Image (cartoon, rainbow, N blue to C red):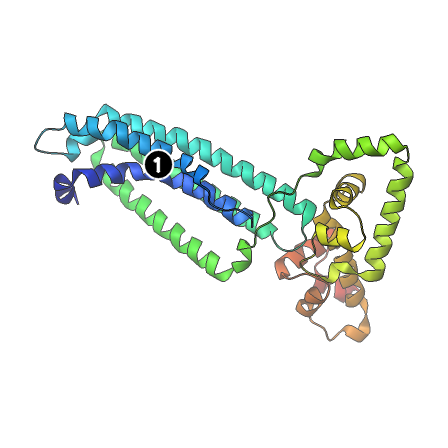
Amino acid sequence: MYLYTEDYRNLEIFRATVCLLGMPLFYLYVQAVCYSDFRLKWKHLVHALPFIIVNLIFIPRIYMRISDGSFIGVLNDMSEIYFIQIVIEFQYAFYIISVFLILKKYKEIYLENYTNTGVSTYKWLFQMTCVFLATHSVVALKNIIRYSGFREIFLWSNVLVGSIALLITCWFIMKALNHPELFRGINSKLKLTKDILPEVEEKLELVNVQNDLINNQITTLKQYMVEKEPFLDPSLTIQELGNQINMPVRDLSILINHHMKQHFFDFVNEYRIQKAMHILKDESKSQLTVLEILYEVGFNSKSSFNSSFKKYTNLTPTAYRNAS
């Protein structure tokens, strides 16, 4: 590799700076997975500016300072390379924080508006981001060793980093292939209850019927949930439920997430669990398996059903059936 790059120095410098595109691409990827309405736009090219600027400014300076002869050794000792490494670290910190903020908002919006297994998307992206953070820590340590004079250790650290990258890539691809539901995404235009609450409360105070109206809405909603069982739809969203009961989605969101002090996710799953408990206790349906029951009550994931059931009853579905 070193003999090749001696003759093609531009490729070696390009390879050294292309990592400035890594975190911007991961940042955009996380947005694309989280939000179904995400589209690449021309404005997103701004994320490529560090890569472009570093190459435009430093590549000519690097070429001018390197004479004929050994290229790699001189390149590694140049102050420009140190500065590029510093830029990479600052850029990484900025994007890793931005990704965690995106995931935090995604989870909040999801819990207030959806009921299917989209939380698994959050868990997967959060795990992946943590793995990337841990891996980058190894890379940062490798770079410290690189400039400390321990050449032999640096070469072994290259092997370690390459192996980790291979394992992460395999895990990433297998996870994506086996779990296509991770890529359904949510609507990024949805607002959190805390953002729309002041406006709605102000409207209610003007007519001075806040408490009575809220109590009536809660009663109507609970009666509808029991009689019509909309929760049996595994892909039920707060928009769809609002349409069914003729209530604006923002009012329904505040009613459930603020006044009833429940996330929409937990509110709907509570009815599903109650339905499942009734079936598990019904001796005439004892032939039904737990898997059949979870699909019947609106869940589409065994892990999500088990965790929700245990959260509500402190028992697994099988233990609850045996105890009934």
Q: Quadrant of the C terminus?
A: bottom right
From the top left corner, tell me how far across and down residue 157 is, in percent.
Answer: 29, 41
Q: Residue furthest left?
A: 68
Q: Residue at x 33, y 34 (%)?
A: 51
From the top left corner, tell me how far across and down residue 280 is, in percent.
Answer: 77, 66
Q: Quadrant of the N terminus?
A: top left
165 left or right, relative to 41 = left
Quarter-wise, where is residue 65 in the image?
A: top left
Q: Residue at x 27, y 37 (%)?
A: 16
* Three-letter code, disc 1: Leu
12 left or right, relative to 230 = left
Vertical relation: 241 (above or below) 22: below
From the top left corner, tell me how far across and down residue 247 is, in percent.
Answer: 80, 48
Query: Disc 1 marks which residue?
Result: 20
Quarter-wise, where is residue 298 in the image?
A: bottom right
Dot 1 alpha-carbon crowd within 10 angstroms: few under 14, some 14 to 19, many 20 or more? many
Vertical relation: 181 (above or below) 209: below
From the top left corner, tell me how far across and down residue 123 is, in percent.
Answer: 56, 48
73 left or right, relative to 16 = left
* Viewer-proximal residue among 13 and 291: 13
Q: Residue furthest top?
A: 79
Q: Residue at x 43, y 53 (%)?
A: 172
* Viewer-proximal residue among 204 and 20: 204
* Viewer-proximal residue among 282 and 113: 113
136 left or right, relative to 73 = right
The number of callouts visible is 1
> Could one spot residue 81 in this view of the protein?
no
Per the image, label 1 sits on a secondary structure element best described as helix
> Could one spot residue 195 in this view of the protein?
yes
* Viewer-proximal residue among 141 and 197: 197
Q: Residue at x 62, y 60 (%)?
A: 301
